[in-house]
């Protein structure tokens, strides 16, 4: 069986008629090329053409642009990256049920485009579909452009105008704001009164992670861990109960056991995924404690065997989030429960934004805006 | 928002071109009319036209034909009933992904046609969609006919020919064989060694229920309860460890507590749903025991308050099953783990079959075959 | 097998040596007799003698005093009622591990005294033990006295003095403050952003229920339901997002569906348990919605069958709470997250307190204090 | 807080009065000394003296005797090892509830002796108590002797004589027969029809693991993995659907993906815990697949990061089992659902048995029998 997604959104891009400015990878490790390509057009009844309003720039984009994933993912170049996208409905296919989407509606694009009929899709986790594709990370063009073609209305979430949610705030929710939400939902049942949760790495994902920890486990002690004082101060503003600077800390285990009354941490969300952060985490977990890995910086998850078995520890990997989880995240944003730190760049300035992200100079999320 | 299903499959039926014999309700409480109507034709890209091979006849059809549900369900007459359908692919719409369905493929039709984008649909439970429709139980014509139009390939499950599963065996799995499976999955975690499960009512659903009890909870004591010795003998053949004839039993509570070493029953699947069966169940549940109601015979679920609270009992209602659960049931059938008792009737003899079902003279499931 | 609890704490009471003032039931439906009985003494190594500091007066005590439970519970008269008890350690048996309890330590008494070795006890739910006994509700004397003998240190939770938690605040946590906590934990997984929870009956349990709803499900809309404006105003102070006065409401279903955007309520905690409140709840549940019954006012739980099955609703009964849940509740109190409304009465004034509770004139919880 | 266990069972051993033959470690890496020590006597009311009938010899005993755990565990030498013990009640303390244990009763000893009041103990997982001690692996003498003193009747499970379960079959259930049971219960919900489970290492634990896979997940494909044909043949006899010899297999991934129709394995129970077995497991897991580690041979659990995150894989460590799980395992044995391969050695021949186990020459479990 092959993917059931209606076809690529690519073909139409190659024959130019009306204009669509896009930032594209033609060759790995090069700056993106900003160019005019064809505006995609609807070729199948369930498709929706979206006018891009905002697209988040993610560390994954750096991995992609650097060519680090060229063997793992099958991506025909040139490709328009950008997988965190919000925009306005421009045109809908003729099989889209009437009345659910109108031209001009603000929509978030759920980025895991599954086949729709396999076990994972039918269970609600399309992002885990074996045949899943992703805008900007597969043969489908992504959101660093003026228009994006979405293969089915099933991947859109409409946001009513009454909520005054800006596209720049909506876009990053679809990945940076979604991934740590799913991660913390996996361990929430462990986090009653008297427990603690640590969020490691207070960057694009961690700033959400700290907030979700307080939202989903308000009675658990939230500990933010990083090696930057600026980021830890930010974590405190976002609700962290305690902070721990890895640079200043002599022995993370003794520090954490002091904070947690000798119990260790019940759940850790590692937004970095480096070998050192994982090694540290294994030392500070409580009995039955769970490490959830969402960061992708390292190559290996390594924890000691005997103590992990005696303590019944777990490592759970968590990937992106599903459609219903994205709906919940957007609901939180509608209720103004999420503080977002975003910095907008125009599409023409995307290579500058990439440079700043690479050197760690972007606080919060960089957002690319077409005009 | 309204239903997202592509449209009714009804319209095409009304303008006859090529022939489609069907058994239809024109007026409640009358026999079905067997007549030739238009063969439905594909009007939207995701649709699939299925040549019906077999359709199960269900107690729900009797409720429908009797007019008992005319206020609860919105059904424009005339309608072709039949919601347990298997058949062969006849034609596919042009948005159906290539290679997944070919003409002649044997398919089971999953009967809960949800909108595809609400919380329940996105969580995998389309049968619970607020906008769900059903073949033969809504504005969509069902399976007591030669052809049925299915609104999307997403509702079909293909069965490879190598498994030698007959359509008459496949059709009843989509409801009678699915409903008790979901019901028992809800309580399986309670059913370890040393526990017991009761299946009440050994009819169309209960014959599957007894088998799933042994399949999903093989270390739990399975007790079949009915008031017919013939049905209890059948239950024994299907694997029940114990049987209890309600007619011969003086006091169900003392009988059950004897069988269960004074613990009571950990889980009960009530395939009848009459007020008496529910009252009996409340008396025989163990501490923390759960009653799952799937039968629809009565009007009211009534259990005593104080003892239910002190014992922390639960009543869980369970409705039909979802797509993944149907896949699992069909997988069990492929592995020859389900014994099915079916009796085939030709479409012309459907009113005779209805009469026999009404008078309780059908052992197992009556199946209508277009011939 | 019979109960494993070390023996009754009763025997010692009958042979007087040193003094122990107590309020006792000698005859049902009579006022309590305030009298001096023997101070209990330790007869087995694991026992702990506790000097009572405060004992909550509960609707269950009224049921008991009225004689309503004389057939259901086996209680030899005379008995000292009082099952919500906090006090100070007076003396410990010689098998109590050294260093865990010292004279003068403030302790809460967990009231479900199980056998310790059955499935429920070994699974952490001693309150569900078939052989469970309860102070003041079994052959064991309760807390409306100066001293109470606890059969094992395993039933005590020590509260460090640094938390400044008063005994009058600690006592009601062991039942009124525990029961709704367990109830809401059962449904918390249903209560993400965009959902709603209703608490029915804003009395002794409901005032905690509203708070736990906001603590355990902060992103769910909390709706308080009662027929007293005063109680609903209190609910608002305690955090309820919406209130509904049953007296003023024409049609609860249409009101609730308006509030919940036509979805219905995802979870209801019924702290009343009357037949009308249950009937109302069945009407306002959402698809897959769950009703948790903790109140004990009525005789019967009755919900309509067909709609409950089609909507897959559940009724879960919830009884008291377990030891770990009580630890969590006390942890919340230590963190000052629970507002408690208590009114203290001296032991000599207990019959007056009973009268006020009976006529609905006690706001929050009445607490009996020995001296 | 310190451990609440009533005291060590050690003290009494040092003052000899009546005889108790025991095999003891006086010095690590030496053969055990077989000697006569004092028969332990009851010093606290809840204790039970058990006449040992059979004690399993475990790889953990080899680790202990080799001195490998001398830094991790605090064990004062000399010590009598043996943590898998069954025997007959010899004498009970005066606080043991009457009627639950009589002299001569056959009992299994649950080996995780927790404090009884911490979060883990109160939640039913005493084996995870921070203060847990173990017979033969702590300051408590174990079962390689004629008598063993058990600190509380709460750690015993009585087996009625009617079941004809032999002590040699009962003893190994308390660890070898318990550990894989808990491991598989953790993943059972993943193992419906159409899935697969692998058991790695068909030794003392794996022979049970294969059987539990078929008992707890009868509709999942059970794959036994080892590098010995003899052990794989044994696995087949015990119910494995497929076997895989690591020595003969070119590429484990391609073999497994062939067997599982390109899906990978949904759950793996690693009874070895070597770095290679874990590396292999990471390669053959399905999407969302879970590796449960119970074996203790290696030092490190290492899995690749990116693919584990993209596939949302999990590593769950599982340690021993709890009391209720042991009750379930014994229930299965009573029902004759577990085949056990045991080989009995007399206490005098224990060093011979140790040698055979070390060289891999014991099929199934070596059992030490006192006389």
Image: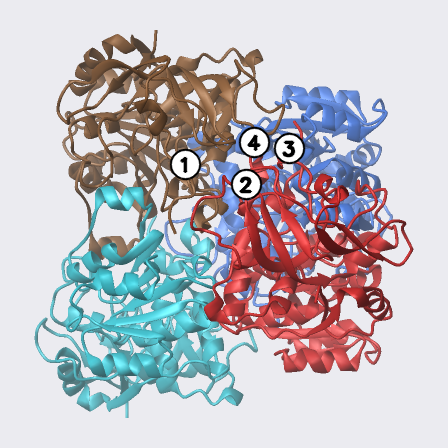
Chain colours: A brown, B red, C blue, D cyan
Q: Secondary structure at mark 4?
A: loop
The residue depicted at 64 percent of the width and 47 percent of the height is: B149
Q: Secondary structure at mark 1?
A: loop
Using the numbered discs, state the Cα–Cα distance from disc 1 to disc 4 in whole angstroms: 18 Å
Residue A56 in the image: state x and y as whole percent: 33, 20
Q: Can see residue C42?
A: no
Tell me whether circle 2 and circle 4 mark residues in contact (CB < 8 Å): yes
State which chain disc 1 sits on.
A
- Name the front one of labels 1 and 4: 4
- Label 3 environment density (alpha carbons within 10 Å; few <14, some 14–19, many ≥20): many
- Determine whether, in the image, residue C17 is placed left or right of residue A149: right
Q: Which residue is mark 4?
A: A95
The residue depicted at 34 percent of the width and 21 percent of the height is: A143
Q: Which residue is mark 3?
A: C197
Kindly indicate whether the residues beneath marks 3 and 1 are on one polypeptide chain: no
Residue B153 in the image: state x and y as whole percent: 54, 47
Tell me whether circle 3 and circle 1 mark residues in contact (CB < 8 Å): no
- Determine whether, in the image, residue A96 is placed left or right of residue B70: left
- The foreground one among C52 and A356 is A356
- Name the front one of labels 1 and 2: 2
Q: Which residue is mark 1?
A: A113
Residue A152 in the image: state x and y as whole percent: 48, 32
- Name the front one of labels 3 and 1: 1
Q: Mark on residue B46?
A: 2
Q: Mark on residue D19?
A: none
Picture quadrant where residue B221 is located: bottom right
Q: Secondary structure at mark 2?
A: loop
- Label 4 environment density (alpha carbons within 10 Å; few <14, some 14–19, many ≥20): many
């Amino acid at each position: 069986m092959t993917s059931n997604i209606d076809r690529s959104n690519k073909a139409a891009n190659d024959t130019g008629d009306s204009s669509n400015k896009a930032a594209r990878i033609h060759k790995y490790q090069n700056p993106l090329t900003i160019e005019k390509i064809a505006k995609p057009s609807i070729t199948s009844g369930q498709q929706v053409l979206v006018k891009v309003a905002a697209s988040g720039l993610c560390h994954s984009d750096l991995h992609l642009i650097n060519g680090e994933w060229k063997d793992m993912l099958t991506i025909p170049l040139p490709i328009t990256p950008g997988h965190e996208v919000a925009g306005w409905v421009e045109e809908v296919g003729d099989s889209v049920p009437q009345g659910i989407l109108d031209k001009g509606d603000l929509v978030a694009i759920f980025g895991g485009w599954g086949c729709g009929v396999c076990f994972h899709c039918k269970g609600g986790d399309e992002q885990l579909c074996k045949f899943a594709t992703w805008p900007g990370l597969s043969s489908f063009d992504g959101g660093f452009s003026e228009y994006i073609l979405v293969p089915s209305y099933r991947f859109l979430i409409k946001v009513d105008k009454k909520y005054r949610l800006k596209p720049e705030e909506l876009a990053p929710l679809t990945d940076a704001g979604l991934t740590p939400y799913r991660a913390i939902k996996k361990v929430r049942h462990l986090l009653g009164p008297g427990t603690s949760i640590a969020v490691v790495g207070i960057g694009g994902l961690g700033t959400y992670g700290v907030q979700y920890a307080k939202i989903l486990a308000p009675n658990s002690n939230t500990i933010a861990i990083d090696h930057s004082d600026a980021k830890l101060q930010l974590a405190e503003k976002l609700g962290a109960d305690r902070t721990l600077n890895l640079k200043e800390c002599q022995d993370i285990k003794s520090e954490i056991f002091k904070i947690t009354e000798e119990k260790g941490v019940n759940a850790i969300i590692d937004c970095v995924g480096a070998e050192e952060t994982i090694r540290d985490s294994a030392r500070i977990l409580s009995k039955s404690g769970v490490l959830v890995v969402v960061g992708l910086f390292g190559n290996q998850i390594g924890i000691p065997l005997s103590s992990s078995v005696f303590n019944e520890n777990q490592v759970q990997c968590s990937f992106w989030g599903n459609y219903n989880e994205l709906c919940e995240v957007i609901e939180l944003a509608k209720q103004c429960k999420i503080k977002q730190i975003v910095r907008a760049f125009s599409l023409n300035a995307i290579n500058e934004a990439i440079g700043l992200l690479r050197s760690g100079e972007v606080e919060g999320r960089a957002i690319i805006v077409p005009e």
